[in-house]
Image (spheres, rainbow, N blue to C red):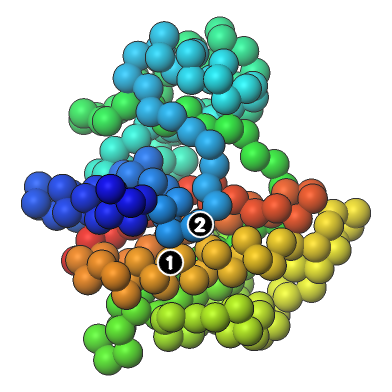
Amino acid sequence: MTKKEEAGSIIKKAVDQGRKALSEYESKQVLAAYGVPVTREALARTPEEAVQAASRLGYPVVLKACSWQIMHKSEGGLVALNLGCEDDVKKAFDRISGRLSGPVDGMLVQEMVSGKRELVVGMNRDPQFGPCVMLGLGGIMTEILNDAVFRMAPVDMLEVEDMAGQLRCKKILDAFRGDGPVDREALFRCVSGAGQIGLDRETVAEIDINPVLVSSDGSVKAVDALIVLA
């Protein structure tokens, strides 16, 4: 089975279960199958599994509650950042577990990625035009500044370059305050991958990749992601 076929199986299983969305872990598996660069991570169901995963990934790590029903983890105190040792992971696991109001798939143990620049990439299914992709300023600035550009899928490299050039914040894609320019090829894979999922999978209604974090060397990774089902 190819990676795209595996992604299709993840989506079909969720649809058959009557779910409205994929979990973050599942969403990133689907995105990775379509070439989107995502964080290295593992799903853990016990504190011991979380510690083992953190050791494999390398400290520091992030710990997040993982469930398709949890779409706003930070607001609920269900995320712990910059965990630097085994004890930190165990304490964060217990703390987050105590705040849960329902069952979860487990805890997502994720590599800690740092960067000053945050972008958002998305896909929405327009009733008239079909799957449309979006590129914009990400993080908490997404809704505040509303700096985003849309195109119909599929998109090629030139179209993604044009989208980037249309942003008011386009200068942060260049060398910025000592950081390198954004890896344009990786950014293209983010946008084109989201669009191709929309074209291939009619049951996917929306994709939200926010933030796409830009590291100091210009590399980009999807740090958080949500795939909403029709």
Q: Which mark is residue 36?
A: 2
Nearer-the-camera pick, 141 or 193: 193
Question: Furthest-front residue in view?
Answer: 1
Residue that badge 1 annotates: 194
Query: Left or right: 182 with respect to 159?
Result: right
Q: Position of residue 78 (x, y in %)?
A: 42, 32
Mark 1–mark 2 contact, CB under 8 Å?
A: yes
Say whether residue 21 is visible. Answer: no
- Residue occupying image coordinates x 23% and y 61%: 229
* Residue 180 x/y as whole percent: 83, 57
Marks 1 and 2, how far apart at CA: 8 Å
The residue nearer to you, when weighing 116 against 196, is: 196
Q: Residue at x 79, y 49 (%)?
A: 216
Secondary element at image label 1? helix
Q: Amino acid at mark 2?
A: Val
Query: Visible in this render: residue 18?
Result: yes
Rendered-image quadrant of the C terminus: bottom left
| Mark 1 neighbour density, 10 Å: few (under 14) some (14–19) many (20 or more) | many
**Between 93 and 217, the one nearer to me in the picture:** 217
Q: Which callout, 1 or 2, points at the residue further toward the start of the chain?
A: 2
The quarter holding residue 129 reads bottom left
Determine the residue located farthest toward the right in the rendered image. Answer: 178
